[in-house]
Amino acid sequence: MTQPGQIGDGGAADVARPWTLCIDIGGTHVKSRVMGPGGEVVGTPVKRPTPRPATPEALLAIVTAIAETLSFDRVSAGFPGVVVGGVTKTAPNLDVGWAGFALGSRLEALLGAPVRLANDADVAGLGVIEGEAVEMMLTLGTGLGAGLYVDGTLVPNLELGHHPSGINAETYEERVGDAVLKRIGEPAWRQRVMAIVEQIRPIWNFRRLYLGGGNARLLRQADMPADVQLVDNTAGVLGALRLWEPAGARLDVVSH
């Protein structure tokens, strides 16, 4: 990484410290950007394809290569699977080698900075929630991620995508994941997404549901119910920054 005080590509030297390297690890891409404490973007966001196979070592090599070009003081990361105490438990859209992998501590050793880590959908929701009553985030991408929040407090690792949908013995992810979208086409996929929204509504009685992830761009806000809001792909990095707020310190996201 560049030395503290230096600027990565296109950065601004007058942005206050600390700078947070926000990493969004996905089944298709690894996205990152450095942000100041007020959400200011420092330098140019970086996006790389997720390696295949997406083993821990292959993905860590991508993250390390990105970090070497940037200046930062701390790291936040969203990971597509269950994360407990900085250890990844599952990663169904990456590789079986992630079961029981101490990602938080490995990132700290490789990057030389403190790390906070959480499920990627949980992190994305932190970037958009208002902190009132029950709110949910669904991320539509390679798979289906989900985040649940009660009065602004995260209920971590929901993993709704792997729950049975009650249709054809399929999980929710098997109903609306990216592979299914390519097979059935956008109109049928949109119908399935909206059916899931209505299916989960009486279970959680959310005040607001957010739909994000790369494939949310295929939906239109005009077609959404009043309590459903589309959000763009910046939610992941903004949520990652929030892991360093005082409320984030109380979550089970710290790697040590």
Image: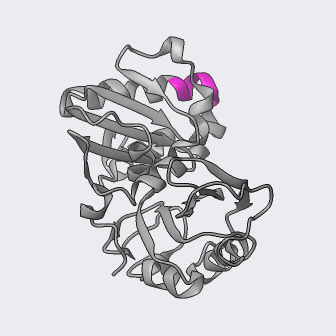
Which quadrant of the figure has residue 138?
top left
Coordinates of residue 186 in the picture (x, y in percent): 63, 27
Work out whether residue 73 or residue 235 is closer to the camera in this orientation and state it. 73
- Image height of 150 relative to 116, above or below: above
Q: Magenta segment range?
A: 185-190
**Quadrant where the N terminus is found in the figure:** bottom right
Q: Is residue 76 left or right of residue 84?
A: right
Q: Residue at x 73, y 61 (%)?
A: 48
Coordinates of residue 69 in the picture (x, y in percent): 75, 72
The residue sitting at the front extreme is 14
**Quadrant where the C terminus is found in the figure:** bottom left
Which quadrant of the figure has residue 89?
bottom left
The residue sitting at the right extreme is 9
Q: Residue at x 52, y 17 (%)?
A: 221
Coordinates of residue 75 in the picture (x, y in percent): 51, 68
Coordinates of residue 127 in the picture (x, y in percent): 44, 43
Q: Residue at x 60, y 46 (%)?
A: 179
Q: Residue at x 61, y 78 (%)?
A: 60
Work out whether residue 114 or residue 184 is closer to the camera in this orientation and state it. 114
Which quadrant of the figure has residue 189?
top right
